[in-house]
Image (cartoon, grey):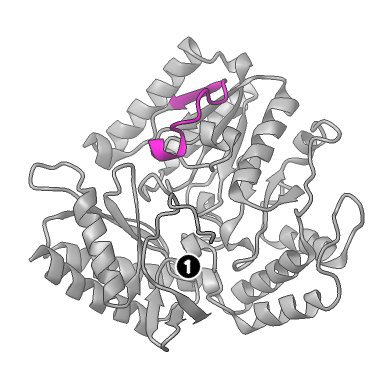
């Protein structure tokens, strides 16, 4: 008898029979609110009719056409349509399957294009689990531990996380920029530094938004020294934060952008978009993959983009995110164990601490589990598992947000009172 690996720890006991929008249905017909969206993947909700129809039609035409062997129309159409939403200067794209592969591709391209070895990443970032991507990840030791040595050439700089340091945003930003300059003077000389790699909002690291002054300071230093700025939009892209790209909140451009998750409403697809002059410097044969740009995934991605545009889902993310955040803040005001509600759009987290001010992963986990028992599926994040996050599909409506907040308040009363 075979079994799933016991290391795959289940966040809930839900066994889903089917899904529709932000709802899951179990084998007995029970209805469960899903505010995880497959970790931000099902951007248009479970089984959006337009996405389903596009995938079904494509399955009957061509399932797999390996894209360095043959070309297919969904890939060509998607590449063209992405020009509508990608920054104009990021006009060259490469497709893969997962966020980790996007990180590996961005890393490889930055090193090849610059001829430099080092990558500066920022404390708390999550960029994947493959060897290179894990070497770039500092959101928690579970991603990095037990298979050393990791890849060399990685230097970690402070992220402007004011809540962690206990300072104002201005003080924290001054500190983080000063420490970055110190790193360039003491650990990784500019002419040895291929790239800065950063998330606009920390994902697994605790849903901490960046800020304009820090990211623009990062862009200035990258431009000054010929360093590639890689922006990891794997979780923040495709409307998740209330703007199409998370970076759009902060007025930065970047040189390479990573995308995945919400790109294809649940079908495996990822990619990088880069300045053409950078992509031209990739070494022949360095990009490819058997399943990248799968025809069905590309068809689903095209439908995803159409749904996002036609249904105004970026604006809905901003509006429903404001509604959800206000409700979470009202709930937090009644429970001192929740010390912060933060995030952008429909990417929000509640941080738990104990009476001494220590991060409280045990209470966060207890709340998350109780919410699931009451019919609201959530996830935790943060280095200590101290945050409970809300990441519903972008199609969530006002009534569904209110229902989730009702369950959340009942859960908090049950666990914390």
Left or right: 292, with 412 as reference point:
right
Q: Callout 1: helix, strand or loop?
A: helix
Asked if 380 appears above or below 29 in the picture, the reply is above
User: In the figure, 251 relative to 279: above or below?
Assistant: below
Seen as rendered, the residue at the extreme right is: 70
Side (left or right) of 402 relative to 282: left
Give the labeled residue for mark 1. Answer: 37
Work out whether residue 217 can be spotted.
yes
Prevalent SS, magenta region: loop
Q: Residue at x 18, y 67 (%)?
A: 331
For residue 255, side relative to residue 183 (left or right): right
Q: In this orientation, does residue 91 appear?
A: no
Q: Which quadrant holds the C terminus?
A: bottom left
Q: Residue 99: where, in percent of width, then height?
A: 59, 49
Residue 145 is a magenta residue: yes
The question of residue 413 being in magenta is answered with no
Quarter occupied by residue 82:
bottom right
Residue 202 vs 76, above or below: the answer is above
- Residue closer to the observer: 396 or 129: 129
Q: Is residue 364 left or right of residue 30?
A: left
Q: Which percent across, then down, holds residue 415?
A: 14, 65
Q: Nearer the viewer, residue 123 or 178?
A: 123
* Label 1: few (<14), some (14–19) or many (≥20) C-alpha neighbours in 10 Å: many
Is 189 above or below relative to 310? Answer: above
State the image quarter where residue 326 is shown.
bottom left
> Which range of residues does the magenta coloring cover?
139-156
Q: Residue at x 46, y 39 (%)?
A: 143
**Residue located 53% across and 42% down the image:** 127
């Amino acid at each position: 008898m075979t079994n799933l690996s016991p290391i795959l720890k289940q966040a809930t006991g839900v066994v889903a029979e089917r899904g529709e929008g932000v709802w899951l249905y179990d084998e007995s017909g029970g209805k469960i609110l899903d505010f995880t969206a497959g970790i931000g993947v099902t951007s248009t909700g479970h089984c959006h009719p337009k996405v389903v129809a596009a995938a079904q039609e494509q399955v009957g035409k061509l399932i797999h056409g390996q894209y360095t062997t043959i070309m297919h129309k969904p890939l060509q159409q998607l590449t063209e349509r992405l020009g509508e939403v990608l920054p104009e200067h990021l006009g060259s794209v490469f497709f893969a399957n997962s966020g980790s592969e996007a990180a590996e591709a961005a890393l490889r391209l930055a090193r090849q294009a610059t001829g430099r070895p080092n990558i500066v990443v920022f404390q708390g970032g999550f960029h994947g689990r493959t060897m290179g991507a894990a070497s770039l990840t500092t959101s928690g030791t579970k991603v990095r531990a037990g298979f050393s040595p990791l890849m060399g050439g990685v230097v970690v700089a402070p992220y402007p996380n004011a809540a962690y340091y206990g300072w104002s945003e201005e003080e924290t930003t001054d500190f983080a920029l000063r420490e970055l300059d110190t790193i360039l003077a003491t650990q990784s000389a500019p002419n040895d530094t291929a790239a800065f790699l950063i998330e606009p909002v920390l994902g697994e690291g605790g849903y901490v938004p960046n800020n304009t002054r820090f990211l623009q300071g990062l862009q200035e230093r990258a431009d000054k020294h010929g360093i590639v700025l890689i922006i990891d939009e794997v979780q923040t892209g495709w409307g998740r934060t209330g703007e199409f790209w998370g970076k759009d909140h902060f007025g930065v451009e970047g040189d390479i952008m990573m995308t995945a998750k919400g790109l294809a409403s649940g079908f495996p697809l990822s990619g990088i978009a880069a300045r053409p002059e950078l992509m031209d410097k990739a070494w022949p044969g360095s990009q490819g993959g058997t399943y990248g740009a799968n025809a069905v995934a590309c068809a689903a991605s095209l439908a995803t983009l159409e749904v996002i545009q036609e249904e105004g889902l970026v604006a809905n993310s901003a509006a429903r995110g404001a509604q959800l955040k206000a409700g979470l803040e009202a709930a937090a005001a009644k429970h001192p164990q929740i010390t912060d509600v933060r995030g952008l759009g429909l990417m929000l987290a509640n941080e738990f601490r104990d009476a001494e001010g220590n991060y409280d992963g045990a209470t966060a986990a207890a709340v998350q589990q109780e919410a699931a028992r009451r019919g609201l599926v959530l996830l935790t994040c943060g280095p200590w598992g101290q945050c409970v996050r809300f990441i519903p599909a972008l199609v969530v409506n006002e009534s569904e947000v209110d229902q989730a907040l009702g369950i959340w308040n009942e859960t908090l009363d049950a666990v914390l009172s």
